[in-house]
Amino acid sequence: EAGVAQSPRYKIIEKRQSVAFWCNPISGHATLYWYQQILGQGPKLLIQFQNNGVVDDSQLPKDRFSAERLKGVDSTLKIQPAKLEDSAVYLCASSFWNSPLHFGNGTRLTVT
Amino acid sequence: KQEVTQIPAALSVPEGENLVLNCSFTDSAIYNLQWFRQDPGKGLTSLLLIQSSQREQTSGRLNASLDKSSGRSTLYIAASQPGDSATYLCAHGGATNKLIFGTGTLLAVQP
């Protein structure tokens, strides 16, 4: 089966600019997750969708981060405006409900 | 606040050795415990998922155990190989499959 697809793989922006990441989950997976992984740390959940509804966004900095999952398939994560501390790898994952997560290769964001 | 701790942070062993990675968590309200592998520049690959009603799971040379009462899980790797070199992450799974990750153990298996 095709895995979780993410783009772009790398992105370098200046602080205060905006950026968007895209994720296409595994076909049939209703649950989609966005994680932020800062260098040397474990991934931290930003937002979890079940179909196109939000299950958990308690750790999403809503003043600058937004995410949507139109039609319950693809998802985009946006940061506007970016800060230096947003430099991280942004991982998308998908799963059936309460099953192992399948991760994409991530987008490495550098904010200068 | 739920915390997940992994010890050791880094481990180097010679090829062929058996090894144990440790994971501890503070929240006993656990639905599952998951172990992942992460290679440099890549995403995470699921290795084992232990439901809260289970004590252990096995896949090939990997065996993971779960002790909810003590808040601990271990990942046992038998007969380690250089290809096992990676970062190993454990994650506490909550009711909605929300995962809280540890910071990982960086494993190097020397040929």
Image (tube, rainbow, N blue to C red):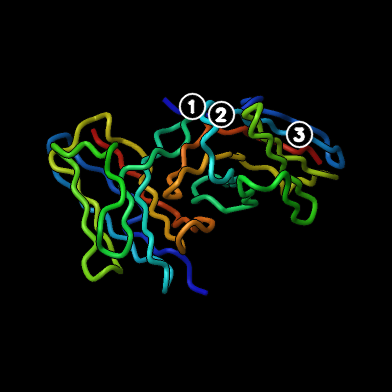
**Type of residue at label 1?**
Glu
- Secondary structure of the residue carrying numbered label 3: strand
**Type of residue at label 3?**
Val
Q: Mark 3 or mark 2, which has the lower sequence index?
A: 3
Q: Are marks 1 and 3 in contact (CB under 8 Å)?
A: no
Q: How many neighbours does mark 3 have within 10 angstroms: few (below 14), some (14-19), or many (20 or more)? A: some
Residue A105 pos. (x, y %): 45, 54
- Residue under circle 3? B20
Tags 3 and 2 both on a single chain: yes
- Residue under circle 2? B25
Q: Are marks 1 and 2 in contact (CB under 8 Å)?
A: yes
* Residue A93 lies in quadrant: bottom left
Query: Numbered disc 2: what chain?
Result: B
Tags 1 and 3 both on a single chain: yes
Callout in the foreground (1, 3):
1
Query: Numbered disc 1: what chain?
Result: B
The front one of A96 and A93 is A96
Q: Mark 1 or mark 2, which has the lower sequence index?
A: 1
Residue A61 pos. (x, y %): 21, 36
Residue drawn at x 70%, y 29% is B11
Residue drawn at x 52%, y 50% is B44
- Residue under circle 1? B3
Residue A62 pos. (x, y %): 17, 39
Q: Are marks 3 and 2 in contact (CB under 8 Å)?
A: no
Q: How many neighbours does mark 1 have within 10 angstroms: few (below 14), some (14-19), or many (20 or more)? A: few
Cα–Cα span, label 3 and label 2: 17 Å
Cα–Cα span, label 1 and label 2: 6 Å
The front one of B7 and B28 is B28
- Secondary structure of the residue carrying numbered label 1: loop
